[in-house]
Amino acid sequence: MTSEKSYAGWYFLAVCAAIYLIAFIIKPETGLPVIKLFSRIILNVLPVFILIFALLVAVDYLVKPVMLLKYFGKGSGLKAYLLSLLGGIISTGPIYMWYPLMNDLQKKGISNGFLATFLYGRAIKPALIPLMILYFGWIYTIVLSIVMAITAVLQGLLIGMIDRRWRL
Amino acid sequence: MKDKKQLKQAVFKAAKQLWRTFPVLVGAMLLVSLASALIPKEIYAAIFSLNPILDSFIGAFIGSILAGNPVTSYILGGEFLKQGVSLVAVSAFLIAWVTVGIVQLPAESMLLGRRFAFIRNITAFFFAIISAVATALIIGVL
């Protein structure tokens, strides 16, 4: 995890930039498509970035760690998993945009099982369901969505169990 | 007055936290762009063996290493089905695409902890296969 004074994040960015440069030297024709795709991703995630910022402020201002632990602490039940699943389903944007908020909640003592359920629950995308029906049919879409929702809770329970035993 | 001060502190803290994660997020986006632009989509279909069990692992593996908009996975999954790849394999591919992230693993490790990130991704990989098998079985019964 990155600490306040850690430069690990910047080293990581430098390595990514170096990989890009190497790819560009080896295959110059890929340089422009990568930059175009990168710019498109940046534009797409901007609204999510603002949403995450607002959520971080709201969580810090309104939610106290004691309150969070009461509902999402180590001993919380199935209801908390279902809430995490719902959070994952309604969350938008790429998965990595949610890491800062997850990191904040983790620091406040929330169980890793709920984070795992939230992250798995993101697999169900209500906005994309019509498109999925178009490609795979409505029976498949409904069955897959239900199976993924159950699996999200199961994975959360498993990660929660591992977390309690070996502290992740 | 106290509320205003607390809100100011919350805004400052949130900005500081996002700034700290900024290089990790930009790096992850750069890796996602590289993977999406450099790996030609045509090669995926050729990787499948047309053995449903082996293909479910292959599907989950391809879904794990690729990243990007889920719409791309629907398009690719639809093409795989047309080419005779089993429903189990295509389901494993679709699920792993959104639940396992090898490209995002460095960013996830840095922000959520290495052990959490590894165990979450490994279990998500196997859960993708289990979910795919369960989905195909249910569809077969219906």
Image: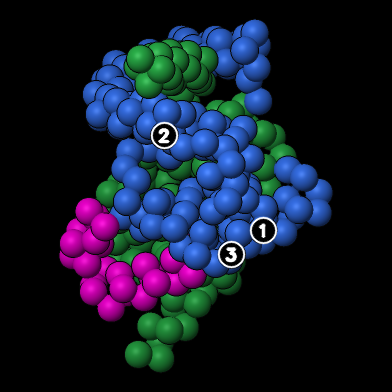
Chain colours: A blue, B green
The kind of residue on which mark 1 rests is Gly
**Magenta stretch encompasses residue A143:** yes
Tell me the tag on residue A93.
none
Query: What is the secondary structure assignment of the residue under circle 3?
Result: loop
Tell me the tag on residue A62.
2
Is B72 left or right of A4, judged from the image as shown? left
Q: Are marks 1 and 3 in contact (CB under 8 Å)?
A: yes
Question: Label 3, on which residue?
Answer: A77
Q: Are marks 2 and 3 in contact (CB under 8 Å)?
A: no
Q: In this picture, which residue range is highlighted in magenta?
A: A126-152
What quarter of the picture does the N terminus of chain A occupy?
Answer: top right
Give me the residue at 27% from left, 49% from top. Answer: B71
Q: Marks 2 and 1, Cα distance to the nearest angstrom?
A: 22 Å
The kind of residue on which mark 3 rests is Gly
Q: Earlier in the sequence, mark 2 or mark 3?
A: 2
**Magenta stretch encompasses residue A43:** no
Tag nearer the camera, 2 or 3? 2
Q: Position of residue A3 (x, y in %)?
A: 65, 17
Q: Marks 1 and 3, Cα distance to the nearest angstrom?
A: 7 Å
